[in-house]
Each structure stands twice: as C-alpha cells, then as structure tokens.
Image: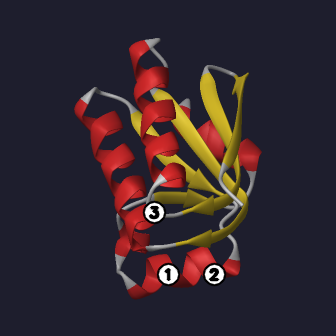
Amino acid sequence: MSMKSSTRQVDGVTILDLSGRITLGEGSVQLRDIVRDLLAKGNKNILLNLADINYIDSSGIGELVSAFTTVRNQGGELKLLNLTKKVHDLLQITKLYTVFDIKDDEASAIAAFNK
C-alpha cells in the first residue's frame, strides 16, 4: 500500500493528512513533491498529520528531515501531528524527536504556528 495524502487549510496552516506508508520509492518521493508544491504556492506553515501512517522506513525518516529542512530554508515551519506509537518510537530511537516540533492535537498545533 502506498502513501495517500489530502490537504486542507485551517487558519493559515496547511494540514497534510497522510495515510499508508512512507518508504523508499513512491511514498518518500510523493511527500517531497507535495511539500515542494505547497512551498511553491506560498504555503509556509505545514502540519504533517501522521495519524494514519502505519509504517515508515529509514528513507521515509530521511524524507521527513529533508522536508523539515526545505521548509525551514524557505522561512516556513513544519510540525508533526498525531504520531503513531511506531513512528514516535522511531523518532525517539533516532534522536529526531528533539528536532521536530511534535503535537498531539490539531488545535494546539495550529495555535503554535500563529504565535
């Protein structure tokens, strides 16, 4: 199963609802393209909702870091929302948990952008 995504706007924040797998190949390329496309359209505040991501591999993790860096370099912010236990554990093991701004509920995540 590949990754699926849908985009919505809430209070100037672009929320990307992702589901499926972020893995080497299709999932990670898809994520990169979506983030670049959003930035090209001027969407600088991006929230990745990972509630329905059931698997992520090392290249998927790399893609999250790459997306984070790309958004930052363009003066934007990227935050993660609703991590599953697997993804949460993976970010803890790789020490990336401290790099990303991770939120558990959408309202506080959106509020964090608008400070």
Mark 1 vs 2: CB contact within 8 A: yes
Q: Which disc number belongs to residue 86? A: 2
In the picture, the quarter occupied by the N terminus is bottom right
Badge 3 element: helix
- Local packing at callout 1 (Cα closer than 10 Å; few below 14, some 14-19, many 20+) is some
The amino acid type of the residue labelled 3 equals Gly
Above/below status of 55 relative to 34: below
Residue shown at 50% from the left, 81% from the top: 90
Residue 82 in the image: x percent, y percent?
A: 70, 61
For marks 3 and 1, give the one nearer the viewer: 3
The amino acid type of the residue labelled 1 equals Leu
Residue shown at 35% from the left, 80% from the top: 95
- Residue where numbered disc 3 is placed: 60
Q: Which disc number belongs to residue 53? A: none
Mark 2 and mark 3 lie on one chain; the one further toward the N terminus is: 3
The amino acid type of the residue labelled 2 equals Lys
Badge 1 element: helix
| Left or right of residue 98, residue 35 in this image | right
Q: Which disc number belongs to residue 90? A: 1
Mark 3 and mark 1 lie on one chain; the one further toward the N terminus is: 3
Tell me the distance, in whole angstroms, between the alpha carbons under discs 3 and 1: 11 Å
Q: Nearer the viewer, residue 45 or 94?
A: 94
Q: Residue furthest top?
A: 41
Residue 76's image quarter? top left
| Left or right of residue 11, residue 115 in this image | left
Tell me the distance, in whole angstroms, between the alpha carbons under discs 2 and 3: 13 Å
In this figure, which colouring scheme has been used for the structure?
secondary structure
Residue shown at 58% from the left, 74% from the top: 87
- Local packing at callout 2 (Cα closer than 10 Å; few below 14, some 14-19, many 20+) is few
Residue 15 in the image: x percent, y percent?
A: 66, 35
